[in-house]
Image (spheres, helix red, strand yellow):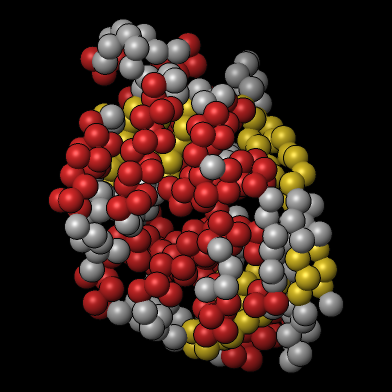
Amino acid sequence: MFRSTCGTRVQHAVKRTGSGGIRGHRERDVGCSIVTSPDASSGAPSLTQRRPVVPPDRLLAELVPPRHFAGESFATYRPDPAHPSQAAAVSRLSAAAEVIRRGPSRGWLKRGKSDPVAVYLDGGFGVGKTHLLTSLAHAVGVEQTAYGTFVEYTNLVGALGFLPTVEALATRRLVCIDEFELDDPGDTVLMSRLLRELADRGVALAATSNTLPGSLGEGRFAAEDFLREIQALAARFEVLRVDGDDYRHRSVVTDAVGLSPDEVRRAAAARPDATLDDFGDLLAHLATVHPSRYGALLDGVGLVALTGVHAVPTQDVALRLVVLVDRLYDRDVPVLLGGAGERDLFSPEMLAGGYRKKYYRALSRLGSLAADGAALVA
């Protein structure tokens, strides 16, 4: 039996500005508990047997740039000459970092003295928005920054309560929100109020999304009924467009045929940090675990092996899978996809609907992780 008390080391990237430009990492322990049973056929533990318990302080402690981008900075971002907006975004964000470090001042982006910086990176999949956002966090200072996805902030409010969340985040100079999406009216009102409270306290804001701020919520709920809230959100941000191609697609084929069940099982059995699950069983299990705990679900996991991968049946199941893929990507956990692979994971209707950008992002990220997993088998 595989046991873990989840004494997870949450990694904080710390940039030291000096002649050497040294970049180190600080770690701290946060707790949860997991007990899993191994898969009988391979000896590998199963994610479906994991029931993570995550205390609220862990949610706050994990608001740091993802491990995947721990070493990134503006200097490591390589703008594509064919898309000048990429270099322009680096320049504007570098200037924003200087302003945030010294506090709001008159003149930047023609904002008043009392207005903190608020930038919004709009662009397609794989153009480096998250790289740029984490670079901004590193430039300001990770200890002075809260960094999380949209859903992680809504989960934090649910765990701590609204006012304690505001108090906790207001201690930072910068709040970064990756993959800003409004999936329901409640989230619209909640995030509008949260950002207003933080901005009023002088906290700088930075966000990424595949959707312009004025179009958030479009196609997912009756956005016109909440137009005032959406317009209030949009008005807070200076939009920086980041054009370009999906860099993950430049070297990764995301519609590869899935592996055979035997290949998946053998690879999982060969690694002590691998898990092995039937895809359908894992999807069912995700419905029993709150999305805020999907990160803890992966504690200590170095490879996720899945057999019987098939098309996702419904939208609610698909959205849970998107969150899991994001947590896998954040943690650089390769995956093995047995069965149909990711080729037909989401239906044409899903890929044409209101959540299509989430699904395409998930396919882009999953394709990269699947390529890493396939390389392990090879």
Residue at image location 28% in from the left, 73% down from the top: 350
Residue at image location 49% in from the left, 39% down from the top: 162
Residue 155 at least partly seen: yes
Give residue 376's position: percent from left, percent from top: 63, 72
* 71 vs 249: above or below: above
Query: Would you say 344 lies left or right of 232 here?
Result: right
Residue 204 at least partly seen: no
Residue at image location 64% in from the left, 30% down from the top: 14
Query: Would you say 332 lies left or right of 74 here?
Result: right
Quarter holding residue 178: top left
Residue at image location 75% in from the left, 40% down from the top: 28
Quadrant of the drawing holding the N terminus = bottom right
- Total number of numbered discs in the rendering: 0
* 54 vs 234: above or below: below
Q: Is 190 in front, or is 248?
A: 190
Give residue 181's position: percent from left, percent from top: 34, 51
Give residue 237's position: percent from left, percent from top: 28, 31
Give residue 147's position: percent from left, percent from top: 52, 39
Hey, which residue is sitting farthest left in the picture?
Answer: 224
* 197 vs 38: above or below: above
* 311 vs 229: above or below: below
Query: Would you say 87 lies left or right of 150 here?
Result: left
Quadrant of the drawing holding the C terminus = bottom right
